[in-house]
Image (cartoon, grey):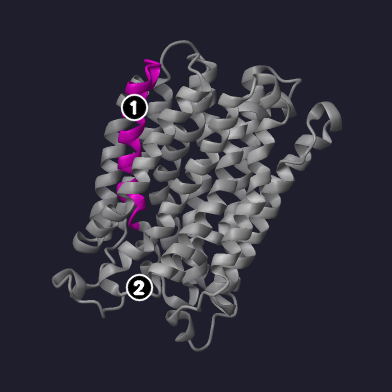
Amino acid sequence: MPRLAAASLAGTAVEFYDFFVYGTAAALVLGPLFFPTFSPLAGTLAAFGTFAVGFVARPLGSVLFGHVGDRYGRRPVMFASLLLTGLATVLVGCVPSYATLGVAAPVLLLVLRFLQGLGLGGEWGGAVLLTAEHAPAARRGLWASFPQIGPAVGFLLANGVMLALSAGLSDDRFREWGWRVPFWAAGLLAAGGLLLRSSLAETPHFREIGEPARLPLAEVLRGHWRLVLLTAGALAVGYAVFYAVSTWSLAYGTERLGVSRTAMLTCIMAAVAIKGAVTPFAAMLGDRYGRRPLCLIGCTATALWMFPMVALLQTGEPLLMFAGFLGAMLAFITMFAVVAAYLPELYEPRVRCTGAAVGYNLAGVLGGALTPIVATAVAGGSGPPWGVAAYLTGIALLSLACFALLPETLPKRVAADPAQEGAAA
């Protein structure tokens, strides 16, 4: 299990590094480089529009790679998705700006962002199922949480590189070529991730299926459509909060509040680092007390914290902004630490890769794709962006209602006796 967990964590870290480095670049430089004829606000909105395309592609990736995972095994998904995302990310760093290529430049950016999202849509399902389907039932939440640490590691890598380049280069050099370096580095990271995954074995749950589903998506839509919609709605709040903190607040703090890039990135990275460290502990609580209670607590905490978070952000004081971000990240991870075990347990093994991944990535469209765009638009006036807090609170309440309609999945024997390791969901 430690070897499997390490390989899953490394792969998701690399894939989310690729995905997050684009979001940071969109907040900092892509607007003026690829949409120079727009106003600063419109350019930022356009850059976030290309950012959103990656989320739209993720459900399509989950269908494509979910089909492969349910028919041919979880292992092939982990190679193909990582390879696709890594190549697309390297090529983003090679796209000439609008000044060189004209309108073809943002079009290429859009296509490559779509391919990034397609690959990431397959990654989560393969990585999570690899650990969840190997893990003993009593510790499934803990072991399945390791791929959930990957996004935090990927975010810290992406923003750490951006922070170093931003601090070490002049604005002109950063805009000219410095922002491209993190995209080029994705090639080396992807190669390392593929090497780590080369010796992984197929999961026992897949080997025991017998006759795989011929059309997994059709079975999911026919027998589990309500479950897919509920999980998408339930998880939307996690995406909305994470990208409000990591992407929208970065643009808002630097452009509207005049806070330096270095200070904003440092505050956000510190909150995300603590979130990553807390993940396995929250997952162990899910193994002890159940998946659903943790999700309900996280949603409630999110709904209560959004207005204080915006108030703390508006101060422009690094320590207060960090406190606001940290509260949001702790509420977020209370839910998302357990969903890597929760979602697979909700679906039968023959359609698990498709069902869990589609629900997870549809939530990304609802919560992640729209949040930076909506937040930037509603924060356009003068005064504190209370509209952003209201928007995030509304999504939290929607997700709370969806979680309330989902069943608990913690095996009864495990809940009665945490030492029990043989029960299956």
Work out how far the residue at label 1 is from the one at label 2, CA to CA, in angstroms.
37 Å
Which residue position is annotated with label 2? 135
Left or right: residue 212 versus residue 311 is right
Q: Nearer the viewer, residue 312 or 236?
A: 312
Examine the rendering and report whether any part of residue 378 can be seen: no
Q: Earlier in the sequence, mark 1 or mark 2?
A: 2
Q: Position of residue 8 (x, y in %)?
A: 47, 63
Residue at image point 30% right, 25% down: 308
Residue type indicated by callout 2: Ala
Mainly helix, strand or loop, the magenta region? helix
Left or right: residue 113 versus residue 131 is right
Residue at image point 52% right, 20% down: 254
For residue 318: magenta?
Answer: yes
Q: Position of residue 413 (x, y in %)?
A: 19, 76
Residue at image point 36% right, 31% down: 325
Which residue position is annotated with label 1? 309
Quick one: label 1, few (<14), some, or many (20+) residues within 10 Å?
many
Secondary structure found at label 1: helix
The range drawn in magenta is 313-338
Secondary structure found at label 2: loop
Residue type indicated by callout 1: Met
For residue 183: magenta?
Answer: no
